[in-house]
Image (cartoon, grey):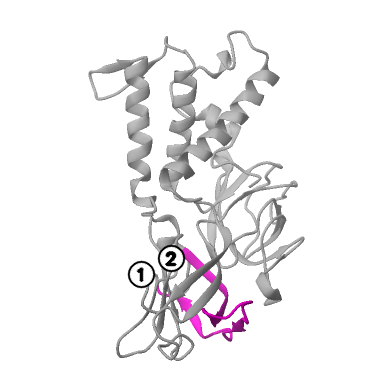
Amino acid sequence: MATPYVTVEALLNAPTGVSWSIIPQPRADTQSMRAEVTNMTWRATSMVDSYCNQVLRATVDNEQLTGPGSPRVGIEPGSRNGVLIMRRWPVIQVLAIQTARNNTFPRAWSTIPAGMYEPAHPLINQETDSASATMPDGAQKILVAPDFIDWRYGRNGYRVLTSYTNGWPHTSLTGSATAGATTLAVDDVTGWAGASGFVYDGLTTETVTVTSVAAATPLTLPNGVGTAQTGPGTLTLSTGLSYAHAPGVMVSALPANVIWATVLAAACQALESGIDAITIQNLPGSQTVGGHGVQDLEKQWQELLCPYRRVI
């Protein structure tokens, strides 16, 4: 988690109406101001995740479920496919699935072969769905080939351990990137393989499509069934960059509404800190001031995030 959902530069340049020059106090020097604004970006990121009841950036998760016959593990009539309903969404990649007898301790895990499972509706699929990567869309359900999860051991006879990647890829550059470069050094490669996103850099903002990733230290999955490409590493692009970019520039597939909601959540922090001289434009011909303005901003960023909330 090396990059918040909005960078300091993006926040300072956003049209929020906040006078950041008086953060953390009037006449603060630039270093103090930027240090506190950095803290605000992280607090706003946490506020966004908390409101959504899940982390929105791409993460690798290992989740155990019990079934069939439970609300999250079932079997489709007719097809006999196993159905896993994960607690986090959108599921963009299934890394491994293991099963064990639920009444056997210690667990004796069996690995389901690769290719015998898939997200029911992938969020990011460059060949079939080029629009969904920036929408509040994607799978919560994983399909498993027939006979790997069945009724032979009765209701709740299986313990199912699923390793998967969910969320939207989000990172920033850890080194300079020159125009024409086809590789980017970043602080998190999670979920980027096959994904598209934006390099957010003002007038030189551009889109990129990632063909492959390489983590500096891949994560070992439970019981040694494989590894996950997550954490700092390198993104390989389908085409070279159009512009040069400096370290710290944000590269993200997060929906724009999530980024803007984070900006507004950060602005609320500034307003709630006692900056009551700021007037916030509301509807045409009207204005809101002070505390009422904070309430309006809070309502706005929360409404933007409603489609991304996880139902627990």
Residue 200, quarter of the rendered image: top right
Magenta span has 86?
Answer: no
Q: Give SS at disc 1.
A: loop
Residue most extreme to the left: 285
Q: Which amino acid does label 2 sit on?
A: Ser
Q: What residue type is labelled 1?
A: Pro
Q: Which mark is residue 96?
A: none
Mark 1 or mark 2, earlier in chain: 1
Name the side, left or right, on which 89 lies relative to 179: left
Start and end of the magenta stretch?
A: 91-120
Residue ID for mark 1: 71
Q: Quadrant of the C terminus?
A: bottom left
Query: Dot 1, how many residues are within 10 Å of its Cα: few (below 14), some (14-19), or many (20+)?
Result: few
Vertical placement of 155 versus 133: above or below? below
Q: Give SS at disc 2.
A: loop
Residue ID for mark 2: 130
